[in-house]
Image: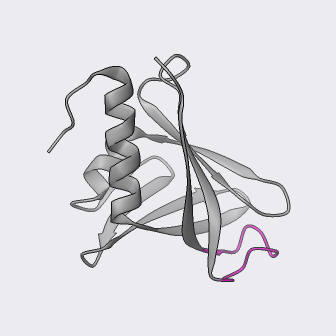
Amino acid sequence: MSVVEQYARAHIVTDADPLLGDRGAVPVVLRYDPATDPRSVRVVLPGSGPREFVVPRELLEQGLRMPVSHGEVQVWPCGRVQTVVEFHTARGVSVVQFENKVLTRFLHRTHATTAEPVPH
């Protein structure tokens, strides 16, 4: 089993990092390591100090189709081509808007790594 890592350009709106603000599309890292945590994806946001969030992989998959939440993370479809992931922390709220095709491609790669069927 190998690590799946993908860079994605995403729009971020946050009050947790004044350097990010809303400055258009920025690089975000999506990382899946089945050896460390086969049920989760790490989302690394840029900024004054990169911030890393752990998101259940299943939550991202469900959030492509319908609004879902788990703890401090909410995911929902935004129109037909985008998905929003919202993180709540003590530092504030970060809203990240991804293109569906980027998330779908990444999630397919995570399943291919573990030889699991892709959920529909």
In this picture, which residue range is highlighted in magenta? Answer: 12-23
Q: How many marks?
A: 0
Which residue reaches farthest right?
Answer: 48
Q: Is residue 14 above or below residue 50?
A: below
> Is residue 14 rendered magenta in the image?
yes
Point 52% across, 16% down: residue: 35
| Residue occupying the far left of the picture | 120
Q: Where is 45 relative to 84, above or below?
A: above
Whether 2 is drawn above or below 80: the answer is above
Looking at the picture, how far across and down is residue 73, in whole percent?
A: 47, 53
Q: Residue at x 58, y 59 (%)?
A: 88
Q: Nearer the viewer, residue 1 or 67?
A: 1
Q: Nearer the viewer, residue 2 or 17?
A: 2
Relative to 98, 114 lies left or right:
left
Residue 48, quarter of the rendered image: bottom right
- Image x and y of residue 110, in percent: 39, 34
Depth check, front residue: 43 or 114 = 114
Q: Is residue 45 above or below residue 13?
A: above
Membership of 62 in magenta stretch = no
Q: Position of residue 36 (x, y in %)?
A: 56, 19
- Residue at 70% x, 74% y: name it: 15
Q: Measured from the top left, where is residue 64 in percent x and y?
A: 28, 59
The majority secondary structure of the magenta stretch comes to: loop
